[in-house]
């Protein structure tokens, strides 16, 4: 099991983010001549630092040092998965409500098909709805009814892959390259890269942690294939789970995998 957590939000997020502290142990792991990129397995990777969670989501502290992740992974597939998570409806709305600024300090904003939300430069919240029925307000509460389009199985699978990316980075920070290079994580690498027959499950809901908590957790077991990844993001929880490759997963898991669970019933 590997976990990383912080308690910070809103005004606790500094506009000028500090540089992450890199311990001697992390520096040693990053300089290991036998190191492999944890996301693709290439030997002696070279590239810049990799943020386990995007800077735009409020993370400047969980960072893999330079030359741990290869440049192709960092700049291509991992960057795309960061963007998927950044634009996930629950994450995007929470980011606006909490007030997490962008990479360069820009106020957060998000658009649903029927409304737009943003933080102004002074920190005030602005909501623009297409019709009055989409938003209502009383003395203490604003109620919004955003509508999200095109969030079907393909998008859910991308989100699951993005969560696995967070989990593998967290495991590297907690346990190092000796752990992440194990063959037990080969199916996780293939899922992150979007290749191979790797069934995935995905879900979301209210977090059981306090609303100011930001936490990533990865759970695996040496005796069983698979990995469970979860992200608690200021009151919201997203999770994803694997059971290895398709031939390793049990029937119950396969019945609930993303591409099956939300499929339309056949005409037969």
Image (cartoon, helix red, strand yellow):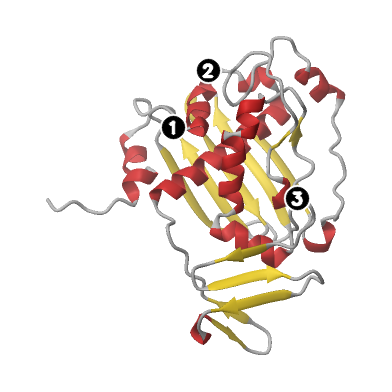
Q: Secondary structure at mark 3?
A: loop
Judged from this view, the residue extending furthest toward the left is 268
Look at 75% across and 46% down and name the residue there: 59
Q: Residues within 10 Å of mark 1 (few under 14, many from 20)?
A: many
CA distance separating discs 3 and 2: 35 Å
Residue occupying image coordinates x 53% and y 67%:
112
Is residue 198 rendered to the left or right of residue 96?
left
Left/right placement of residue 195 relative to residue 91 reads left
- Name the N-terminal-most of marks 3 and 2: 3
- Circle 1 sits on which residue? 243
**Mark 3 sits on what residue?**
103
In this image, 185 relative to 104: left or right? left
Q: State the residue position of label 2.
A: 183
Residue 169 coordinates in the image, percent (x, y): 66, 32
Whether residue 197 is situated above or below residue 258 in the rendered picture: above
Q: In terms of sequence position, does the residue under pointer 1 or pointer 2 come before the other?
A: 2
Mark 2 packing: few (<14 Cα in 10 Å), some, or many (20+)? few
**266 relative to 15 in the view: left or right:** left
In-front residue for pair 248/138: 138
**Residue 124, percent from left and from top:** 76, 74
């Amino acid at each position: 099991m590997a976990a990383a957590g912080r308690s910070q939000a809103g005004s606790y997020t500094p506009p000028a983010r500090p540089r992450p502290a890199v311990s001697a142990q992390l520096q040693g792991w990053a300089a290991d001549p036998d190191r492999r990129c944890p996301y693709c397995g290439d030997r002696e990777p070279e590239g810049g630092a990799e943020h386990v969670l995007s800077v735009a989501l409020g993370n400047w502290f969980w960072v893999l040092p330079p030359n741990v992740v290869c440049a192709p992974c960092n700049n291509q597939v991992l960057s795309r998965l960061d963007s998927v998570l950044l634009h996930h409806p629950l994450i995007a709305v929470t980011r606006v409500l909490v007030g997490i600024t962008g990479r360069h300090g820009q106020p957060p904003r998000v658009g649903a098909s029927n409304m737009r939300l943003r933080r102004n430069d002074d920190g005030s919240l602005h909501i623009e709805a297409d019709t009055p029925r989409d938003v209502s307000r009383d003395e203490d509460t604003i109620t919004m009814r955003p509508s999200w389009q095109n969030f079907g199985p393909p998008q859910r699978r991308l989100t699951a892959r993005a969560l696995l990316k967070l989990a593998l980075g967290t495991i590297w920070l907690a346990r190092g390259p000796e752990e992440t290079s194990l063959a037990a994580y080969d199916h996780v690498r293939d899922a992150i890269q979007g290749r191979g027959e790797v069934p995935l499950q995905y879900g979301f809901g209210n977090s059981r942690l306090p609303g100011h908590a930001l936490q990533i957790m990865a759970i695996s077991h040496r005796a069983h294939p698979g990995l469970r990844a979860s992200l608690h993001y200021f009151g919201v929880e997203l999770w994803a789970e694997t059971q290895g490759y398709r031939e390793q997963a049990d029937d119950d898991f396969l019945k609930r995998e993303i591409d099956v669970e939300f499929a339309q019933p056949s005409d037969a």
